Image (cartoon, rainbow, N blue to C red):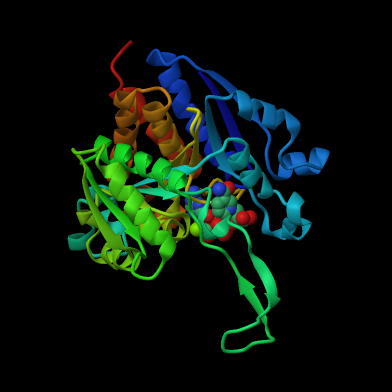
Amino acid sequence: MRVLALAGDGIGREIMPEALRIFAIVQGRCGVRAELVEGAIGTGPLMDEGNPFPAATETEARNADAVLFGAAGDPSLDHLGPKRPDSAIGALRKLLNLYGLVREYRIADAQLAMSPLRPVRARSTDFAIVREISGDVYAAQPKGQRIAEDGPFPGEVEGFDTMRYTESEVRRIAHLGFRTARARSGRLVSADKSNVLATSRLWQRVVAEVAAEYPDVALTHQLADNTAMQLVTDPASYDTILTANLFGDILSDVASALTGSIGLVASVVFNETGQVYYEPGHGSALDIAGQDKANPIAMIRCVALMLRHSFDRPDLASTVEQAIDEVLAAGLRTAEIHVDGTTLVSCSAMGKAIADRLEALLPPD
Ligand code: NAI
Ligand code: MG
């Protein structure tokens, strides 16, 4: 297995070493064999060689079985347009043909006080969102601005986008949704807007067809606005949510907020060739970068996800997750989740504490 680690910008450079510290422990002790390569992406290579996604990184990404990505982006360089540092994210996703993003949201009892929801609503929350990320209104053409020919104000400039999915695109993400639900508790909610959108009516039909291949998974169709409401009022009722790019973008940010911090949530992204890509749910957080303040947990969860999906070691993935839970239960908190009665720790101290717990939890070699 070849693992490519791309720390990137801002807090990516602080959280990646903590994730690699965890990976080194399982590599050293548990028979996980992997070649680890580190590559450059974002502002660093942009400054050094004028390209945020250099050819060497592109080659490494092509050859990697798994990519661990930190973050890329610097809003002060947004004026560079197609050469801005975070353009590398899109270029990398395109190169790898990534289409399906799965993000897991769990509120462990130790996390209850961090959730903006009252404990009675937040307790037992544990669900996944499977989001299509290659198509939909974000990607489909035509889009742009033009002079309106009809509508309430003809002659004015209007903006327009195209919502579009083909049957194959829906079928591909539906299979990922059903496989994800099958590996969890077997309940899948497909969120769409079939009451108003033709694209969603196609989506609903194809998802229902794919369901025939997964008789062990219980499928429900739900309108996405209702899903947004129920995520806040009864998140514990969900197991797996399947949705398109636009609705998934919004629902997944609502879901991240429920857990208490964007610094706790990690994603796994799939293509059709078996390469898998892992990233935290947040960006480069330049407001706190370089201060050893970032929460490394999302990045460390990426290692757990990688052990589960790329190394087929769910046992080790669960042990890493348990180490995180135990450190949170012991009251350690990075700045963004620190409250009275808990212990404020730095990024590196949090990483070290999780590593120490992991060492203690792993069986002796
Ligand atoms: P952001 O996720 O970087 O930060 C949003 C807020 O959350 C900030 O207040 C930040 O301090 C906090 N935060 C984020 N991660 C944290 C962590 N691990 N621990 C503690 N606090 C954390 O989003 P923002 O500020 O909108 O974007 C900053 C840059 O990152 C932009 O250039 C954006 O384009 C890029 N970006 C990159 C992503 C990626 O690499 N996948 C995703 C989102 C944004
Ligand atoms: Mg978003």
Residue 261: x and y, percent? 41, 55
Which quadrant does the C terminus fall into?
A: top left
Residue 197: x and y, percent? 41, 67
Q: Is residue 109 left or right of residue 41?
A: left
Q: Is residue 152 left or right of residue 177?
A: right
User: From the viewer's perspective, is residue 197 above or below residue 236?
Assistant: below
Residue 330 in sight here: no
Where residue 54 sits, quadrant-wise, is top right
User: From the viewer's perspective, is residue 318 above or below residue 82?
Assistant: above
- Residue placed furthest toward the top: 365
**Viewer-nearest residue: 285 or 237:** 237
- Residue placed furthest toward the bottom: 153
**Viewer-nearest residue: 86 or 295:** 86
Residue 25: x and y, percent? 43, 21
Q: Is residue 101 left or right of residue 59?
A: left
Residue 41: x and y, percent? 67, 39
Image point 39% across, 15% down: which residue?
A: 29
Image point 38% across, 70% down: which residue?
A: 196
Q: How many marks?
A: 0
Image point 24% across, 41% down: which residue?
A: 212
User: From the viewer's perspective, is residue 38 above or below residue 171?
Assistant: above
**Viewer-nearest residue: 272 or 331:** 272
Q: Is residue 49 left or right of residue 241?
A: right
Where residue 305 sits, quadrant-wise, is top left
User: From the viewer's perspective, is residue 236 above or below residue 41?
Assistant: below
Residue 45 in sight here: yes
Where residue 48 sits, quadrant-wise, is top right
